[in-house]
């Protein structure tokens, strides 16, 4: 991890915990001046300093230094699989991932995968609502149209499940995700 990334991460975590530089200094037993220099990028942190800061901020040394690539990957898998909640109720495919992302927003890398997932789920939901509304408004006399929309809804469900599982496997294999969707949410959540 670059020195500037480490300094930004330390500053971000410190602020997330609501600590001033003086409080972090007191809790970690590292001088306030050292913390100021690290956060300003004017000084590199020693192994001991990073270890004490990591302990104080309840994060592992490796996660602080190397970044949270593994935990970010695991979190991305969890968020992606949480979109399967649409099976219970269609809007949950948007709400559950959105809640998970917003809860951990400060601790995850700004990954485009989260935005793509949400855009896909919104697009899928709107398509589902339109198909469902068409099915309900079709009169019984037009049974063929009713059956068409009913089959369309089943296909939409299976399509969403397949795309979620497909992208979960891609994330596991550290490949880019693939979603076809309207861009409701612009880059950088």
Image (tube, helix red, strand yellow):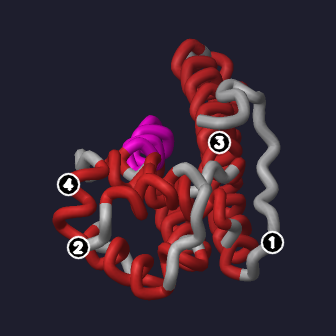
| Sequence order check, earlier mark of 1 and 2 | 2
| Sequence order check, earlier mark of 1 and 3 | 3
Determine the secondary structure under disc 3.
helix
In this rendering, the label closer to the viewer, 4 or 3: 4
Which label number is shown at residue 29?
A: 2
Q: Residues within 10 Å of mark 2 (few under 14, many from 20)?
A: few
Q: Residues within 10 Å of mark 3 (few under 14, many from 20)?
A: many
In this rendering, the label closer to the viewer, 3 or 2: 2
| Sequence order check, earlier mark of 3 and 2 | 2
Q: Quadrant of residue 165?
A: bottom right
Quick check: 50 left or right of 147? left
Residue contact at pointers 2 and 4, CB within 8 angstroms? no
Q: Determine which residue is flagged by label 1.
A: 175
Q: Marks 4 and 3, how far apart in space?
A: 35 Å
Confirm whether the magenta stretch covers residue 93. Answer: yes
Q: Marks 2 and 4, how far apart in space?
A: 10 Å
User: Residue sitting at 24 percent across and 46 percent down?
Assistant: 18
Residue 152 is situated, as x and y percent measured from the top left of the image, at 69, 40
Q: Marks 1 and 3, how far apart in space?
A: 16 Å
Which label number is shown at residue 115?
A: 3
Residue 100 is situated, as x and y percent measured from the top left of the image, at 40, 51
Quick check: 132 left or right of 105? right
* Residue range highlighted in magenta: 88-102
Q: Marks 1 and 2, how far apart in space?
A: 41 Å
User: Residue sitting at 66 percent across and 36 percent down?
Assistant: 188
Q: Marks 3 and 2, how far apart in space?
A: 40 Å
Quick check: 158 left or right of 78? right
Residue contact at pointers 4 and 1, CB within 8 angstroms? no
Q: Can residue 89 be seen in this view?
A: no
Q: Determine which residue is flagged by label 4.
A: 23
Residue 37 is situated, as x and y percent measured from the top left of the image, at 50, 57
């Amino acid at each position: 991890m670059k020195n500037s990334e480490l300094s930004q991460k330390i500053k971000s975590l410190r602020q997330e915990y609501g600590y001033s530089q003086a409080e972090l200094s007191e809790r970690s037993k590292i001088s306030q001046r050292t913390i100021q220099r690290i956060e300003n990028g004017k000084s590199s942190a020693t192994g001991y300093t990073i270890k004490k800061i990591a302990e104080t901020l309840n994060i592992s040394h490796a996660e602080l230094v190397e970044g949270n690539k593994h935990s970010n990957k695991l979190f991305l898998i969890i968020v992606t699989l949480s979109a399967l909640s649409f099976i219970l109720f269609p809007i949950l495919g948007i709400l559950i991932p959105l809640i998970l992302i917003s809860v951990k927003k400060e601790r995850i890398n700004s990954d485009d995968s989260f935005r793509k997932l949400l855009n896909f789920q919104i697009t899928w939901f709107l398509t589902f609502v339109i198909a469902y509304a068409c099915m309900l408004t079709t009169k019984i006399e037009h049974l063929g149209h009713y059956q068409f929309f009913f089959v369309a809804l089943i296909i939409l469900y299976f399509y969403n499940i397949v795309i979620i599982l497909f992208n979960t496997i891609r994330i596991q294999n550290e490949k880019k995700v693939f979603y076809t969707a309207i861009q409701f949410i612009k880059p950088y959540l």
